[in-house]
Amino acid sequence: MVKFSEEAKSLHASDIREILKVTENPEIISFAGGLPAPELFPIDEMMKVDVEILKKEGRQAVQYSTTEGYVPLRKQIAKRMKTSFHTDCTYEDIIITAGSQQGLSLLGQLFLNEGDIVLVESPTYMGATTAFAVNFPQFVEVETDDKGMVPEALEAAIEKYGDRVRLMYVIPEFQNPTGITWPLERRQAIMDIMNKHDIPIIEDDPYGELRYEGETMPTLKSLDTQGNVIFLGSFSKIFMPGLRIGWMVAAHDILEKAVMLKQTVDLQTSSFAQRQASYYIDMYDLDAHVKQIRDLYGKRRTLMYDSMKKYFPEGVSFTYPEGGLFTWVTLPEGLDAKAMMPEVIEKKVAYVPGGAFYPNGGNANHFRLNYSNMPEDRIVEGIKRLAEVLKEKIGK
Amino acid sequence: MVKFSEEAKSLHASDIREILKVTENPEIISFAGGLPAPELFPIDEMMKVDVEILKKEGRQAVQYSTTEGYVPLRKQIAKRMKTSFHTDCTYEDIIITAGSQQGLSLLGQLFLNEGDIVLVESPTYMGATTAFAVNFPQFVEVETDDKGMVPEALEAAIEKYGDRVRLMYVIPEFQNPTGITWPLERRQAIMDIMNKHDIPIIEDDPYGELRYEGETMPTLKSLDTQGNVIFLGSFSKIFMPGLRIGWMVAAHDILEKAVMLKQTVDLQTSSFAQRQASYYIDMYDLDAHVKQIRDLYGKRRTLMYDSMKKYFPEGVSFTYPEGGLFTWVTLPEGLDAKAMMPEVIEKKVAYVPGGAFYPNGGNANHFRLNYSNMPEDRIVEGIKRLAEVLKEKIGK
Ligand SMILES: Cc1ncc(COP(=O)(O)O)c(C=O)c1O
Ligand SMILES: Cc1ncc(COP(=O)(O)O)c(C=O)c1O
C-alpha cells in the first residue's frame, strides 16, 4: 500500500457527489445540482463561433499560451466588470482561471497555512470550504441573517482571533446555498470593518448578473479602499460551465502569486475555450443572452417559491432569492434533512441536505433547492412530492 | 500588505518565464520553449469536429460533467495505451486531467508532506519540480547516464533515505530536458528495484509516441507488478496543447484520491475540449497525424544534430535523441549557460540554461535546445549563431 500525504488522507467522498450520482437517473426530479438550464445554451451560435476562431487564429487558438490568459477576453471582462458589476479595473487587474473553482483553490493555497483562520458565512458554499480544507485551516463560521453576514458577529470574530484570521470568503450576491443577497448598508458595514484590517477577502460572485428583481448592488470590490478584495467571476452560469472559464480581479501582488501558482497547477486555461467566450461576446449579444436566462430562471424561482408556499406544511420556512439559482429551506429543529434522503429519493425527488454547507457540522435541519435546471411542470410536481415527505415528518 | 502563506512565499518568477517573454519577439530564433510545430495542427479538421460535437451533443458538451472525464475519450485512451504504449488498462483505470501538468500537481499534493523525499532524475523536467515544490519536499537527484537513471544510484538513494522516500518521478522516454531514453534492460533493472518497495512512481510520458527511430519500449507501467506506477499521458504533443487534455493511468485507490482532489481544484476538465480530442480520434486518423509530426520533427532533430556537429566547437557535447522535442548540450566545466544568455539573445537566438533542471542547483554548464518549433532554415541559422558565441567562450 502506497502512503498518501496528510492532505490526501483528509480527502473524503462527499455526500453530495453520491447524491448527484443518484440524480443522474432521469426519472428523478433533481433540485440537487447547480446546473444551468441546458435548453438556453447558444449551441447554433457556437458553431459559428468555433469556425470563426479556427479561421481567424486557428493555430494560436490551440497552441500553448500565457498563464495570465487571452488578452482580448481579459479586456472584455474589464468592460463587463464596469457595466455589469459597477467595478473599475483594466485587463491587467484580471487573470483567467479554469472556472471560479480554480480561483478558490489557488487562493486557499496562497493565503492559508495549517491552523490559520478563514472566516466564512454560516452556511457557505461547500466547494469553497473543501478547496480550502487541503491547507488545514480552521473555519470560523460568522453568523448570518436574512441580510447576509452580521457585522457585529464579524467584528467579534476578528477581535477574538486577531492575527490568526488570514482570509475571509463570502458570496454577497444570491448566495450558494441560501439565495440571500447583502443589501447596500450591510456591504458598507462589512467593508467598514474590513478596511481597517489587512485581511484578504474573496468575493465569490458567479451569480451577480442573474438578478430577477430589485437593484444591482455595488460589489465589495468597489467598496474596497485597501486593495484587499479579490473578486472571482465565472462564465459558468451566464454562458457555459463546461468550458471552465472564470476570472480573478485582484491587486497585482496577489495576481502575480496566483499566476506563478497556476503555472505549476495547469500551465494555463484552455486557449480555445477562452476564445469561445471571447468570440461569442464579439459576435453575439451576451447581455441579451443573460436576459433570456434571467427571464427563465426568474419564472422558475417564482414558481418554486409559490409552490412551496402552497404545498409545504407549516413550520417549514424558505428564502425568497432575488436572483441566482438556489432557495434554502429550514425545517423545524430536530428534523434531519440528510436522514430524510432515502424517503425523498423513494419519491423520486432530490435536494442537497444543508449540513454540508456548514464546515464545522451540525445544522441538519436545512436543505438546498435548485430551480434553474428543471422545467416548470417538474418544479411543481417535485415540490408536491417533497411536501408529502415533509408533512409525514412534521406529522400532520 | 496582506500576508501570504508559506507556500505563496516559496513561489518565484522563473528564469524560463523571463526568457520565454524575450522569445516572443519573432526576430529571435527560439530553441527555448517546448512548443509543437503550429503548421501541423489539423485546423480544417477541427472545424468539422467542432460542428459535429455541437450537432450531436451540443448541450452535454458545454454543461458541467463528471470529474473523472468523458467516458468515450477514456475508452479511446485505453485503446491507445495498448496500441501505442503496450500497456493494458480499461477506461476505469484512467482519468482525464488538464494536461499532464495537472497530473503532476495533483500527485505532488497526494503524496508529499513537508520534508518527504522525492527521487528525480538529474536533470529533470523543471515543471514537475516546481509543481512538487509547493509541498516543501526534499529533492534527491539520482545520477543519470546516457541510458537514463543509474540503478545502483537509485538503490543507494533508497538505502540511504529509507522510509523518507515517498515518491519517484521519471521521464523514461525522450526525456525533458536531455532527450535520453531508457533502454529495456535499464527499465527492467529500475523496476526490479522499485517492485521491492512501496514507493509510488510517476512515469511522465508526453513524448512516447514521437519516436523517430529504434524500437518502442515497454512502459514502466507495463513492468509494474505492484500497482505503484502512475502513468501520465498528454495530447499536448501529439495533437494540441492549447486544449489542455492529458490523462492519468493508476491504481484505483490513487485515482479515487486524485478525483476528489481534482474536484476541489477545478471541478473537471473542459467538457468541450475532451470531446474535441475524442471526436477527432473518431472522425480522423490520429495515428496518421502523429506520423506526420514524427516525420517533421525527426527531420528537424537530424538537422539540428548535424548542424551542431558541423558548427559547434570541440569540447561541446550534445545528445542524439531518438524522439521527443529536445537535445541537451554540455559545455566545458566552468562555462555558465545562464551567464551567456545576454550574448546569446544579442545574436537573436535563445535556449533554456540547464541549471533550472537541477532542483538542487549547480550544473550551469548545460543548455536545452528545442527543435520542434523552428523551420529548417532557422534551425541551421540559429545553431550557427550559437556556435559563434560558443567559439568565443571556448576561445578558439
Ligand atoms: C458560490 C460558487 N462559487 C464557485 C462555483 C464554481 O463554479 P465554476 O468553477 O463553474 O465557475 C460555484 C458553482 O456552483 C458556486 O456556486
Ligand atoms: C516532461 C513533461 N511533462 C509534462 C509536461 C506538461 O505538458 P502538458 O500539461 O501540456 O501535458 C511537459 C511539457 O512540456 C513535459 O515536458
Image: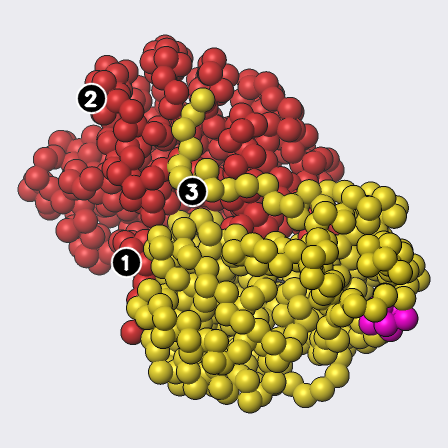
Chain colours: A red, B yellow
Q: Looking at the picture, do discs 3 and 2 lie on one chain?
A: no
Mark 2 chain: A
The residue that label 3 is drawn on is B7
Residue B19 visible in the displayed image: yes
**Residue type at the position of mark 3:** Glu
> Can you say which quadrant of the picture contains the N terminus of chain A?
bottom left
The residue that label 1 is drawn on is A9
Q: Looking at the picture, do discs 2 and 1 lie on one chain?
A: yes
Mark 1 chain: A
Dot 2 alpha-carbon crowd within 10 angstroms: few under 14, some 14 to 19, many 20 or more: few
Residue in view at x 29 percent, y 55 percent:
A6
The quarter of the picture where residue A158 lies is top left
N-term mark: 2 or 1? 1
Real-space Cα distance between discs 3 and 2? Answer: 26 Å
Real-space Cα distance between discs 2 and 1? Answer: 30 Å
Residue B283: x and y in percent read 70, 72
Residue A260: x and y in percent read 55, 42
Kindly report which numbered mark, 1 or 3, lies closer to the viewer in this rendering. 3
Badge 3 marks a residue whose secondary structure is helix
